[in-house]
Image: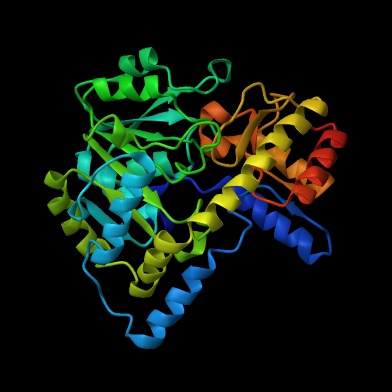
Amino acid sequence: MISSTQTSHLDSIGSFLAMEIFSRAQQLEAQGREIIHLEFGEPDFSPPPEAAEAARKSIENSPAGYTHTQGIEQLRVEITKKYSEDYGIRIDPEQVLVSNGSSLLLFLSVRLLAKPGSEVILTDPSFACYENTIRVAGAEPVLIKLHKEEGFQLNLDELRKKVTPKTSAILINSPTNPTGVVFTPDVMKGLAELEIPVISDEIYADLSYEAPPYSFLSFSDNTIAIHGFSKYYAMTGWRLGYMITPIEWMSAAARLHQNLMISANDFVQQAGIAVLQKSGSYCESMKNEFNKRRKYVLNRLSELGMDPGYTPTGAFYVLYKYRDSSKSSLNLCMDVLEKTGVAIAPGRDFGLGAEGYVRISYSNSMENIERALIKMAESGLL
């Protein structure tokens, strides 16, 4: 007999609560309600025009066949140029592995470094899938809380207390989702001094507004850096990401990738090459607009009596602590959606440490952001 008990070993893997908000928002839109979407971290800009042109030419001129499992060499060369020019880091193309998005690479990285039963330290709050990915990979997540009173910076003293003989890796994300905080160089240096392998999710690295962007590879080569084209390049649905590892780890990483994915799509990789070569000014203009929105949101929240109590300097998120802590963040977001037509993400999506908060994404137009903030403030719910 077919039964759900056959999948019960996955019961601990939670879903994205923001998707529940989005689903309800779609229902309301189908009923004719106008919804302002601030629940997702998806740029509202079109991808660089060079991406579509390169993909079109590739499909027209050649079959979309398999490529090298680490990715097209020219793309890997362009990635090494990016890391050299943008972050001052020299890497070899053989250290780069390209895949269909960075999510699979996160799983691959944890599986690469963490033996079943070992521990991976990560922050709380953090991106919703991190805990689940670690569990699916057979390791155990160990959480270190980030505190608003400390600007959501990583407290190294608290982290050191979490290290045990079972610790196999530390997973970080800077700039961070959901706080938008960039970890300081001192934090990064302290992490490197622990001499524990670090998995550095750098998907928002280029969206650093008050300081030049950098990679954790600047502090340690005992690192797997994960990056991709979704955020800074506004190519979420293209599913193109890459990882950079020490050359000693790449053989195992490539074998895993061969078995899980074989290779990334040829024409999407061609788009990646074109974007890295030609789209710098276009992407910087998007970044400048995000920064304008960031400053506006922080100023407007303060004017409306909703000061978040810290200053996010990266990505495109603000984590806001609402007044009624007795109410779950999911229920609050549902109430806000029903009453105001504004969709925001429940803090609980990002760990227990973010319960009592909501995440506001400013990846929408300035006009929509202004209307949404006023609606939320006037609702009295936040």
Residue 122 as seen in the image, left or right of residue 304: left
* Residue positioned 42% across, 81% down in the render: 57
In the image, residue 380 lies at what x, y percent? Answer: 85, 31
In the image, residue 329 lies at what x, y percent? Answer: 66, 35
Q: Where the C terminus falls, by quadrant?
A: top right
In the image, residue 245 lies at what x, y percent? Answer: 22, 45
* Residue positioned 68% across, 44% down in the render: 344
Taking the image as drawn, is residue 184 in sight?
yes
In the image, residue 186 lies at what x, y percent? Answer: 38, 19
Q: Residue furthest right?
A: 378
Residue 263 as seen in the image, left or right of residue 182: left
Taking the image as drawn, is residue 41 in sight?
no
Q: Where the N terminus falls, by quadrant?
A: bottom left
Nearer the observer, 365 or 339: 365
Nearer the observer, 172 or 216: 216
Residue 106 as seen in the image, left or right of residue 13: left
* Residue positioned 59% across, 30% down in the render: 312
Residue 373 as seen in the image, left or right of residue 163: right
- Is residue 158 shown above or below 283? above
Count of number-bearing discs: 0
- Type of colouring: rainbow
